[in-house]
Image (cartoon, rainbow, N blue to C red):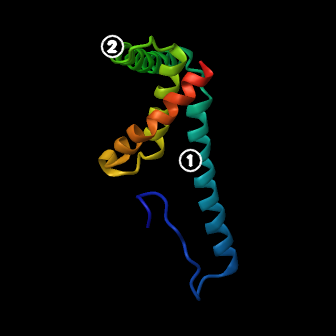
Amino acid sequence: MVGRRLAVVRPGPLRSSSDRVAARRAWLQRIRALEAKTFAVYERPSRPASCGSSSTETAFHAAGVAEIYLTLWLLAAPRPSLFTAFLLESVNRVITVVFKNRPLRVGVDEAGTRSSPACWASARRWA
């Protein structure tokens, strides 16, 4: 038994084929009802919630780019471009997403920092 309502009925030696067919149809009806409820949640237009979520996400990424730009501006002798900050922030986000399964990202940030001079050279070439 899975949960309280969904039971997997396995055909036994004493069950007739019509009982098995009826049990499978009932099981498929429960699955279809669950699927319909799930899709009904996502079909509802929730424009205010999605606008707030997307604007918060955009502000988060813009703050990340601004943070890297300010850090580079305070540390680097030549003034960095926004493209350089954007490129380094993008690399940082990709590292975060790819290595999400690594506990505490052990060693990942160090490897990203080690490879960042190559990104820096690439950013200077394209800027």
Dot 2: within a 10 Å radius of its alpha carbon, few (fewer than 14), some, or many (20 or more) residues? few
Number of numbered callouts drawn: 2
- Where does residue 43 sit, x and y in percent of width and height? 62, 29
Residue 78 can be seen, yes or no = yes
Q: Which mark is residue 66?
A: none
- Please name the residue shown 63% across and 50% down the image: 32
Q: Residue furthest top?
A: 79
Q: Quadrant of the C terminus?
A: top right
Q: Which residue is mark 2?
A: 74
- Please name the residue shown 55% across and 33% down the image: 41
Q: Quadrant of the N terminus?
A: bottom left
Dot 1: within a 10 Å radius of its alpha carbon, few (fewer than 14), some, or many (20 or more) residues? few
Q: Is residue 10 left or right of residue 85?
A: right
- Please name the residue shown 34% across and 46% down the image: 105
- Please name the residue shown 45% across and 11% down the image: 79
Snapshot quadrant of residue 19: bottom right
- Mark closer to the observer (2, 1): 2
Instruction: Depth check: give the residue in front, 97 or 43.
Output: 97
Of callouts 2 and 1, the N-terminal one: 1
Residue 90 can be seen, yes or no = no
Instruction: Depth check: give the residue in front, 53 or 91.
Output: 91
SS at badge 1: helix
- 52 above or below 96? above
- Per the model, the C-alpha gap separating discs 2 and 1 is 55 Å
- Where does residue 40 sit, x and y in percent of width and height? 60, 34
Q: Amino acid at mark 1?
A: Leu
SS at badge 2: helix
Q: Which mark is residue 34?
A: 1
- Where does residue 80 sit, x and y in percent of width and height? 47, 14
Q: Amino acid at mark 2?
A: Leu
Asked whether the beta carbons under mark 2 and mark 1 sit within 8 Å of each other, the answer is no
- Where does residue 110 sit, x and y in percent of width and height? 34, 43
